[in-house]
Image (cartoon, rainbow, N blue to C red):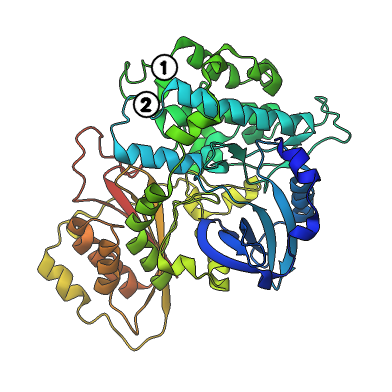
Amino acid sequence: MAEGSELNQESRAKWPTCPDDYELQEVIGRGATAIVQAATIKKTNERVAVKRINLDRCNTSLEDLLKEIQVMSQCQHDNVVRFYTSFVVQEELWLIMKLLDGGSLLDVIRYTMQRGNCRNGVFDEIAIATVLREVIKGIDYFHSNGHIHRDIKAGNILLGVDGSVKIADFGVSAFIASGGDNTRDKQRHTFVGTPCWMAPEVVGQQPTGYDTKADIWSFGILAIELATGTAPYHKYPPMKILIMIIQNESPTLDMCAEDPDQYKQYSKTFNKMIEQCLQKNPADRPTAKQLLKHEFFKKAKDRSYIAKHLVLKFQERKAMEEKLANRRKLTHMRSIRVIDDEEWTFSSGSDDDSSSTNDDATNPKLPSLENLTVQNIEELIGKPNAITKPNPPVDDSTSQMTVQETTSGIKDLCIDNNRIFKFTLRIRNTQGELNDIKFDFNKSNETVKDVVSEMVSANLIHKLDADLVTSIMSQMVENSTDISTTFALKSHVDSSSTPDDKLLIGFAQLSLNV
């Protein structure tokens, strides 16, 4: 049954507008200003998703939020997440939506890469064609009704256990025309989206603006993401990504490969579709309707194929959740924020998340640098951690300090002082993804060694690097000045990549903001 007709037959009275009528359950996604939880309607026992937006922390105007709700309420399509109702709860805006239990495409990518060797590709063309056909149907629906989504990526594509594929997160979507008028003169000029998936005309903020073809570019990047597991340029800082999008040639599968034959399993038809979507000139890209007729989608199967081969079953999601449990608990306990998740990532599962409080909504995990969503160019420039700056030279004497020297340097660190130090450790994880670990340090009730030990226990840093991090952090606390230090990691043993202190390959960067 089409989702639109199903929605028209339902009474909005079915969806309560009182928070007491909902039993909040596990956290299924976090963002900079919002948290997404599963919930059960107490009277009907029906499961829904609740997106809780903290209005105090949200830099979006109430007018824009109302526009978001308007867009969501108007969307009635099989490939768009269904919106039920909304209401205000104290400082939060609650959006009640359909719950999809199969995870996001990003979850499925990560799970697949964890299970096996994906060097030559994460998904085969049948799986990719089946998923992308559903996504482009949803995009076509948006465009036909005068909307641009502006943030198409794997993290915003959700799967149902029945194999349904739905586009989520309308937080940056925009109504660009009235009455379905979707002509080229109806264009946007707002700098919105996620850097790796942004079209050149969005990044460049050209006077002519941009239109629905920006989503087609993002769709092409999504196709690469499903094949390689990551978006192009994902290892670089946001500002560098934006520059590369404008200056470099359009991304291809071969450009993302480490050797010439790495992705040879993918056909010319698939590569050609990507090439057509990633034309620098928006006018040269196909429309969503034209893409639906592309030869590549002849390989697509029905939703039962997705349900069988892609949807994360309960047991699989539980395994992912348990793997992150210790890390989540540390994050909750110490307010260490590892910047590696995004709004619709189904990967949270610690006990702390199950019993959410308002603190969860007011202190959500921030999106990764690779997946950072920015509302305007000033916001990006205003983030010191988002801009590539010359790093100070590595202090060789510090990097070679002995364990004894490190220990002696911190033994008297606990001083009767309630001053709070705010640190950021930028370091790559075991998958090579660049993370920011943000944490506070209070000299009056803990030692640097305690803090570093907790991060080691949570697998945020390697035990081989613990002494060095302890030493550098101790010196920063003693000096109590704004400082940023880049240092070589003892744990770096990847012979396939050359250490680079600028890209932080084999290096890490510790910063103190006082």
Asked whether 191 or 362 is in front, the reply is: 362
Say whether residue 18 is left or right of residue 166.
right
Q: Quadrant of residue 453?
A: bottom left
Point out the residue furthest to the right here.
179
Label 1–label 2 contact, CB within 8 A? yes
- Label 2 crowd (10 A; few <14 / some 14-19 / many >=20): many
Query: Percent x, y for residue 491?
Result: 20, 50
The residue labelled by disc 1 is 266
- Where's residue 488, x and y in %? 24, 50
How far across and down, in percent of the image, does residue 251 sit?
A: 49, 23
Figure label count: 2
User: Which mark, residue 90?
Assistant: none
How far across and down, in percent of the image, does residue 408 sit?
15, 75
Residue shown at the point (59%, 21%) measured from the top left: 277
Q: Residue at x 39, y 55 (%)?
A: 321
User: Pointer 1: residues within 10 angstroms few (<14), some, or many (20+)?
Assistant: some
Mark 1 to mark 2: distance in Å?
Answer: 8 Å
Q: Earlier in the sequence, mark 1 or mark 2?
A: 2
Q: Visible in this render: residue 236? A: no
The foreground one among 405 and 431 is 431
The residue pinned by badge 2 equals: 121
* Residue 206 appears in the figure: yes
Q: Residue furthest front?
A: 44
> Nearest the camera: 193 or 52?
52
Residue that appears at 48% across and 47% down: 369
Amino acid type, residue under disc 2 in the picture? Gly
In the image, is residue 236 above or below residue 439? Answer: above
Under tag 1, what secondary structure?
loop
The quarter of the rendered structure image containing the N terminus is top right
The quarter holding residue 137 reads: top right
Q: Is residue 147 above or below residue 89?
A: above
